[in-house]
Image (cartoon, rainbow, N blue to C red):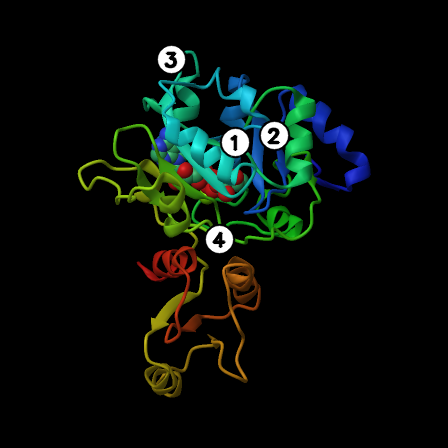
Amino acid sequence: MQTKILAKEELSLAISALRNGNVVAIPTETVYGLAARLDNETAIEKIFYSKQRPQDNPLIVHIASMDMVADLAVDIPKSFYQLADAFFPGPLTLVLRKNPLVSDQITAGQSTIAIRMPYHELARKIIEKVGVPLVAPSANLSGKPSPTTSLDVYEDMKGKIPYIVEGGRSTCGIESTIVDLSSDQPRLLRPGSITKKEIEKVLQSSLEKPLPNVTVPGMKYRHYSPTAKVLLFDDFMNLLDYEKTSSKKKVILSQKEGHTPFSATNIFSLFRIADRMKIEEILIDCSEVIEEGLINRLTKASSQ
Ligand code: TXA
Ligand code: MG
């Protein structure tokens, strides 16, 4: 199969392909997603297959309007509407109790469902025109850094899907914040560019960590990792000492002058560039304050 990157003038090709049960990569403000309509089992199977994603890792359902929520979830708490009011459309995913009519294939047999309304105009336009919500994981091969440009997607999905919709560089650069509202106590499952504090301010209550005895499927897999080894340093002097002793092909990411500056916006891009350059070690200077979404991705990328 040939994979074509579509300009926004060619959007109708992507829309008909999705309507007809194909998988298409679409841009969002967080990262690119690998989308299929939520009511087509064969298309959803193709998502798992193309990404080499474990079957027990559930998918996020992407909506274009609030009326799409009613068919997806039950027992919707007030907190959902408060957070949706404040942050939809935007880089926030909310987990609710699932409507039993939604296929278990999407939620990996869980009794909950993750819902998000993307801010990216093309993403919402595509969902609206297809007419049903789209399920979409990040459009990378499992275990690789999430894609933030159409070329990143092309690198991982070439020959596997018909279309990638060009939507420019994803402005957030890391995946959405995920908050679980399916029980009485709201929990932060994945930090992102909408911060814990911002969410707590709207809820007027504190967000807890995920329950330790419950495995959130997505948390048990290694994520976001470049092939290069990622090493974090709290002390810049230690980083420089290490640099002198290692004979590996290296790059230093640091806000200090003379080095490559990094942020949530460009971190996955930098990981991919390092791999293309066959860099063996990425040394990251964490001596300055780093936002929660970014430090979470760095920690995951550095853990073996
Ligand atoms: O920003 C994003 O969220 C991007 C864009 C494309 O929307 N999507 C994304 O999807 O990051 P994915 O599949 O790469 O990550 C979704 C995470 C996984 O860790 C999955 O386990 C978790 O969300 N998840 C999905 N449904 C869940 C549920 N019902 N309960 C708990 N976690 C869930
Ligand atoms: Mg992902």
Q: Are marks 2 and 4 in contact (CB under 8 Å)?
A: no
Helix, strand or loop under label 3: loop
Give x and y (percent) for residue 144.
47, 51
Q: Do the residues labelled 4 and 1 touch (CB within 8 Å)?
A: no
Helix, strand or loop under label 1: helix
Q: How crowded is mark 1: few (under 14 residues within 10 Å), some or many (20 or more)?
A: many
Vertical arrangement, residue 77 with respect to residue 266, above or below: above
Give x and y (percent) for residue 148.
58, 51
Point out the frontmost of discs 2 and 3.
3
Q: Which of 17 and 212 is in front in this view?
A: 212
Q: Which of 261 and 279 is in front in this view?
A: 261
Rounded to the nearest angstrom, the CA distance separating label 4 from label 1 is 17 Å
Label 2 CB less than 8 angstroms from ligand 1: no
Residue matched to label 3: 100
Quarter residue 64 falls in = top right
Sequence-wise first label, 3 or 1: 1
Residue matched to label 1: 47
Q: Are marks 1 and 2 in contact (CB under 8 Å)?
A: yes
Q: Residues within 10 Å of mark 2 (few under 14, many from 20)?
A: many
Helix, strand or loop under label 4: loop
Residue matched to label 4: 145
Label 1 CB less than 8 angstroms from ligand 1: no
Sequence-wise first label, 2 or 3: 2
Sequence-wise first label, 3 or 4: 3
Sequence-wise first label, 2 or 4: 2
Give x and y (percent) for residue 283.
41, 74
Residue matched to label 2: 23
